[in-house]
């Protein structure tokens, strides 16, 4: 068959993670590949109770009807309260829209801002789905250097001047894929740079509540005096990814364009999901839930770090995140993690090889490990298998 697909989609390959999911679906594989919250951390009882309550209430028919593209008004109200945790105040209903997951926030921003060939700056490495989305808009991602001290501000400014980007995309808290966090001083400087160059920043912050050590850092948006920062906050990692509910907050003119873009995409986010998230927040379920899952994730993170020390060769470098779901490993430059992935799967363990997180896809000696979705026992067995493989490769 010959179909005349668009230029946007015809050369697009499946995102690496989706392919890996297929490979590691066998039950005997220990997967450190995904980015899923732990099943045992999903608040099933509360969501069930809330859904029952909502559908037995006088709001039921409203919830089952079409709603406004901007979102379910009670959630917009509780959302404006919720973002105060990130240091974001003085926002009104014209500054917020409910979206179908944080991923949709990235897509709608690209839809609103990007023409074919436009440049977008991303931290290097970055969330791989953003690279995938940029391809569908025929935009060009440019990596900004990021070392042990986080994002390199001099490189950021140089690339702003050189490439005249339309947008900057950052995951500043417990980044996917590295787990790194940009410190407060740099966040302020980033907000100031965006204002200086009139550059729009999409601050993607799905992991900020999953902090296991250290002190909370205010969002970049909290330093934004001019309105160039858009704040994307998802409930996927704190309540449930299946509810597909997130919020995006920022300048009213941008929110209006996102609303028009969303209207064309899916009319509005599921009102039932929005009402569940709203009630969850209003009943005060978030903090007790976080108090339950944080020790669970912290134990897994600490176990994975301890197993790296115990089983991995000494020639590697790795991040020690204070939160989030990922640890990032750098190997000697001659190791290709994409090539040895099949051998890892033969050892019954999976990871995501790092090249998919780089705009040029040209860095092959890194890998991402997820710790949230394996048991402590699986972490021990899987990390031993992976450590043995890496020791072998580094010896060879
Ligand atoms: C940085 C980042 N942004 C966005 C998402 C998408 O999350 P969702 O669409 O479920 O809110 C993820 C999920 O892994 C992520 O890591």
Image (cartoon, helix red, strand yellow):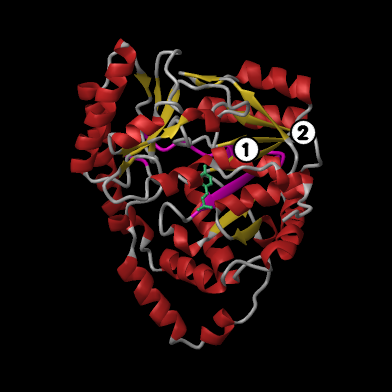
The disc placed on residue 198 is: 2
Q: Are marks 1 and 2 in contact (CB under 8 Å)?
A: no
Vertical comparison of 234 with 312: above or below: below
In the visual, does 363 lie left or right of 2? left
Which numbered disc, 1 or 2, marks the residue that appears first in the sequence?
Answer: 1
Q: How far apart, in angstroms, are the residues tagged by discs 1 and 2?
A: 23 Å
In the visual, does 24 lie left or right of 302? right
Q: Is mark 1 within 8 Å of ligand 1?
A: no
Q: 127 or 172, which lies in front?
A: 127
Q: Give the magenta part as a residue range.
A: 211-234
The disc placed on residue 49 is: none
SS label for mark 1: helix
Q: Residue at x 31, y 21 (%)?
A: 390
Viewer can see residue 211: yes
The picture places residue 357, in percent across and down from the top left corner, at: 54, 32
Q: Residue at x 55, y 38 (%)?
A: 128
The main secondary structure of the magenta stretch is: loop
The picture places residue 233, in percent across and down from the top left corner, at: 53, 50
Q: Quadrant of residue 171?
A: top right
Viewer can see residue 327: no
The picture places residue 225, in percent across and down from the top left corner, at: 68, 38
Residue on which disc 1 sits: 131
- Residue 45 within the segment the image draws in magenta: no
- Residue 213 within the segment the image draws in magenta: yes
How many neighbours does mark 1 have within 10 angstroms: few (below 14), some (14-19), or many (20 or more)?
A: many
The quarter of the rendered structure image containing the N terminus is: bottom right
The picture places residue 229, in percent across and down from the top left corner, at: 66, 41
């Amino acid at each position: 068959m010959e179909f005349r697909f668009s230029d946007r989609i015809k050369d697009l390959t499946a995102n690496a993670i989706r392919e890996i999911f297929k490979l590691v679906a066998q039950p005997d594989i220990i997967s450190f590949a995904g980015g899923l919250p732990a099943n045992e951390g999903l608040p099933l009882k509360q969501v069930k109770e809330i859904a029952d309550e909502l559908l037995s209430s006088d709001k039921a028919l409203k919830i089952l009807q079409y709603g406004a593209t901007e979102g379910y008004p009670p959630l917009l109200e509780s959302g404006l309260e919720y973002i105060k945790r990130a240091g974001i105040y003085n926002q009104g209903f014209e500054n917020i829209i409910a979206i179908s997951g944080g991923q949709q926030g990235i897509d709608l921003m690209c839809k609103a801002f990007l023409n074919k060939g436009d440049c977008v700056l991303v931290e290097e490495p970055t969330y791989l789905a953003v690279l995938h989305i940029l391809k569908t808009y025929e935009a060009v991602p440019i990596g900004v250097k990021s070392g042990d001290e986080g994002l390199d501000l001099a490189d950021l400014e140089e690339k702003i001047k050189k490439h005249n980007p339309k947008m900057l995309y950052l995951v500043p808290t417990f980044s996917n894929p590295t787990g790194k966090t940009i410190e407060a001083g740099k966040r302020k400087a980033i907000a100031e740079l965006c204002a200086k160059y009139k550059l729009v920043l999409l601050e993607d912050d799905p992991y900020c509540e999953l902090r296991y050590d250290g002190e909370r850092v205010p969002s970049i948006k909290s330093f934004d005096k001019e309105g160039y920062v858009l704040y994307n906050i998802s409930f996927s990692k704190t309540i449930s990814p299946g509810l597909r509910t997130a919020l995006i907050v920022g300048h009213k003119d941008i929110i209006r364009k996102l609303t028009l873009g969303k209207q064309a995409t899916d009319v509005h986010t599921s009102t039932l999901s929005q009402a569940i998230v709203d009630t969850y927040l209003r009943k005060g379920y978030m903090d007790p839930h976080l108090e339950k899952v944080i020790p669970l994730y912290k134990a897994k993170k600490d176990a994975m770090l301890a197993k790296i020390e115990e089983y991995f060769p000494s020639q590697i470098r790795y991040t020690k995140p204070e939160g989030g779901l990922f640890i990032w490993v750098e190997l000697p430059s001659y190791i290709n993690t994409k090539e040895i992935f099949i051998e890892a799967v033969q050892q019954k363990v999976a990871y995501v090889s790092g090249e998919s997180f780089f705009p040029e896809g040209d860095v092959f000696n890194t890998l991402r490990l997820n710790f949230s979705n394996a048991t402590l026992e699986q972490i021990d067995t899987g990390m031993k298998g992976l450590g043995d493989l890496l020791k072998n490769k580094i010896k060879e």
